[in-house]
Image (cartoon, helix red, strand yellow):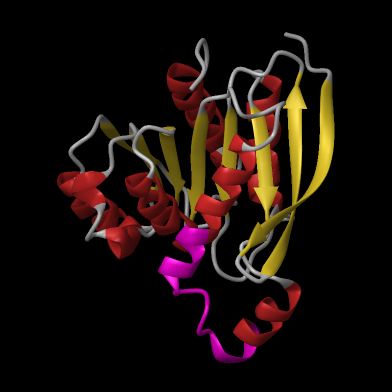
Amino acid sequence: MQTQEKEHVVRIQAASVSLEGTVNLPRDAQGIVVFAHGSGSSRHSPRNRYVAGVLRTAGLGTLLFDLLTAEEERQDMRTAHLRFDLDLLADRLLRATDWIDGQPYTRDLRVGYFGASTGSAAALMAAAERPQRIYAIVSRGGRPDLAAAVLPRVQAPTLLIVGGDDAPVIEMNRDALAQLRTEKMLSIIPGATHLFEEPGALEEVGRLARDWFMRYLAGGNS
């Protein structure tokens, strides 16, 4: 498959702040996936960057951006008051989606969300607000339970990926799965813990995410 791609360093305006991000688009991109990282992480998350690379090899574009500014990250390290402000995080994800819609090179692409940890809840909340724009969601080790109030409104097909040795999060995801009213699936990776650090675990996450997004993003535009 053609893997030549263009990289764009971007700034996404969200209310009074500007958030840094990177867009990578393979030639003839089949869609674009926006990454929502978990607390204490950033657009430089090695796990998300790995998955993003797998998606681009399959012909999907990616947008990795910081949900918080550098100053907000410093404040949150001290107070932990922003990492669970899911209304704020979901709004910033929506601003990133608006940014995609405003660019000539991305506005015709179907959009998917890839969320990790608390970023999964933000992705589900944002998708519930844009049912005609978000075509697929993948959650890695996520906390969809934190978005319980909106789960019945999510229309995008949703894949929940959890490590087989991450028992508390498995139950949270099973409960969330029961509340979703869209096409949905729970994939449990045997032997994997919360960060999918075991041999082959993250590769399986990448494969599952790639297949899910290719199914719902490829071959069409918004």
* For residue 90, above or below residue 205: below
The quarter holding residue 212 reads top left
* For residue 72, above or below residue 43: below
Range covered by the magenta-colored residues: 77-91
- Nearest the viewer among 173 and 8 is 8
Is residue 64 in view? yes
- Nearest the viewer among 195 and 32 is 32
Left or right relative to 219: residue 184: left
> Residue 94 appears at what percent x and percent y?
50, 51
Q: Main secondary structure of the magenta part?
A: helix
Left or right relative to 44: residue 135: left
Left or right relative to 157: residue 195: right
- Residue 122 drawn in magenta: no
The residue located at (23%, 34%) in the rendering is 182
> Residue 121 appears at what percent x and percent y?
39, 57
* For residue 67, above or below residue 207: below
> Residue 184 appears at what percent x and percent y?
27, 33
The residue located at (55%, 59%) in the rendering is 92
The residue located at (43%, 21%) in the rendering is 216
Quadrant that contains the N terminus: top right
The quarter holding residue 183 reads top left
The residue located at (60%, 17%) in the rendering is 30
> Residue 20 appears at what percent x and percent y?
75, 57
Is residue 198 in view? no
